[in-house]
Amino acid sequence: MTLTLGFHGGAGTVTGSRTLLTTDRRQVLVDCGMFQGLKELRLLNWKAPSFDPRSVDDVLLTHAHIDHSGYLPRLVKEGFRGPIYATPATIELVRILLRDAARLQEEDADYANRKGFSKHETALPLFTEADAERALGLLLPVPYDEWIELNGGVRARYSNAGHILGAAHIEVAVSDGGSDTNVVFSGDVGRYHMPLHPDPTPPPRCDTLVLEATYGDRHHSDEPLIQQIRKPFLEALGRGGTILIPAFAVARAQLVTLMLRELMESGALPEVPIHIDSPMAVDVTRIYSRYYGEPELSDSHGGRMRPLFPKNVRFHRTVEESKQLNNLKGPRIIISSSGMLTGGRVLHHLFRVLANPRDLLALAGYQAVGTRGRALEEGAKSLRIHGQDVPVRCHFISLDGFSAHADADELLRWVTSGPALPTRVFVNHGESEASTTLVKRLHDEAGIDAITPGLNERFVFDASSRSWGAKQS
Ligand SMILES: [Zn+2]
């Protein structure tokens, strides 16, 4: 048997996840993400991948997030023609996310051309809406917990990873020339004891595990969210103020709504209107609602299921509906994206909230370097919004615990929760500090042989000794 793993993205970074599994007879790409964040990373999207997209037979998609799916339209543009396997819920979400990403790409290129600041004669989008549609046409649904045959001696099985709706870790079994082995790809691992998303299913017995390390060196707060929220929220509502919660449209917006409902129903917070002002969040919440109560979203902790469309939640899809929010009186909660205040409708609300001492701004997730959210966390006294400097006079809190990612302890818990420990773990999809810290913990606390592959490094499996050789660039 010949088996190699190539790490063509998500190596030393948390974006651009692409891992290529190659046998004599099959090439399977697990995830096909876009590089995001710093410019040097984003430029990687424009480089041809170091494998030939035309020779890839199948793509296995762990979940819908753009850092795992956003390169698919480009892969198809570069000649990929095979099936893209994903769970039914992932397919629904990825339709929304890829169309949105394509629209943004086209708008950005258009803007650059009108302003004339592109270095190239004509700025081009990384992919167009037509490219996205071609990729979406290749999606094939796979259920959780059933084997699918990919031919060439390769099979795959998806299990619920908890992370977001539809997310999976994928076991790939390879049998060739009388020997067989398996590799599990963790995708993004979800958290334990969270409402809305179930605990991640334990990994199956495996020889090799490719593990994400987004929070490989972090610990999520032990203080329950309810405790973090209660006092500042009560005070802001008591002042008759607006509470603005910037939140990602997928998973975060739904989780925030659910938690607020829980607090209102238990009497911990007064009943005030919750406005969800993001067209994408409206669409995604609709999908979440359909899966609510199904195994995909079962709450494993019982008795906490709440409808996602309760009576005091109002959805705002159009710009007109969004503008009407400005004229409302009285205390209210507004959830809008983007989650790190980098763009989107949330900026219009931020403009009003920031300068108002009655109001409260509550950040609900990781704020990357260079974003307005990070600037606020670091004590910025004013923010530039739509060309104006706006003083920070509102109240401000940063909530810890809405993350959809397992922290370091939870990653270790997940790795060791299967029937046996993996023989080798490749730690990728993490900044280098997070990855190396997790490698050390896997070794010291679980005795597992773990390494961090670099970008475009390949490793060959020796079937006779059942071990992995040294890296090849
Ligand atoms: Zn993710």
Image (cartoon, rainbow, N blue to C red):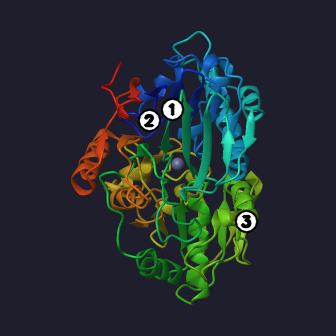
Do tag 2 and tag 3 residues touch (Cβ < 8 Å)? no
Q: Looking at numbered disc 3 in the image, what kind of residue is underneath it?
A: Ser
In this view, the residue in front, 214 or 110, is 214
In the structure shown, which secondary structural element does the residue marked by tag 2 occupy? loop
Q: Residue furthest bottom?
A: 267
Q: Residue furthest left?
A: 444
Q: Looking at numbered disc 2 in the image, what kind of residue is underneath it?
A: Gly
Which picture quadrant has residue 164? bottom right
Residue 10 numbered mark, or none:
2
Do tag 2 and tag 1 residues touch (Cβ < 8 Å)? yes
In this view, the residue in front, 295 or 383, is 295
Residue tagged by mark 3? 289
How much space separates mark 2 and mark 1, taking CA atoms? 7 Å
Name the residue rendered at 42%, 45% in the picture. 211
Q: Residue furthest top?
A: 121
Name the residue rendered at 52%, 87% in the picture. 268
Upstream in the sequence, badge 1 or badge 3? 1
Nearer to us: label 2 or label 3: 2
Upstream in the sequence, badge 2 or badge 3? 2
Residue tagged by mark 1? 18
Give coordinates of residue 377: x percent, y percent. 35, 56
In the structure shown, which secondary structural element does the residue marked by tag 1 occupy? loop
Q: Is residue 128 above or below residue 427?
A: above
> Would you say residue 326 is visible in this rendering?
no
Upstream in the sequence, badge 2 or badge 1? 2
How much space separates mark 1 and mark 3, taking CA atoms? 30 Å
Give coordinates of residue 351: x percent, y percent. 53, 55
Give coordinates of residue 289: x percent, y percent. 73, 65
Residue 259 numbered mark, or none:
none
Image quarter hosting the C terminus: top left
Mark 2 crowdedness (10 Å alpha carbons): few <14, some 14-19, many ≥20? many
Q: Is residue 443 above or below residue 304?
A: above
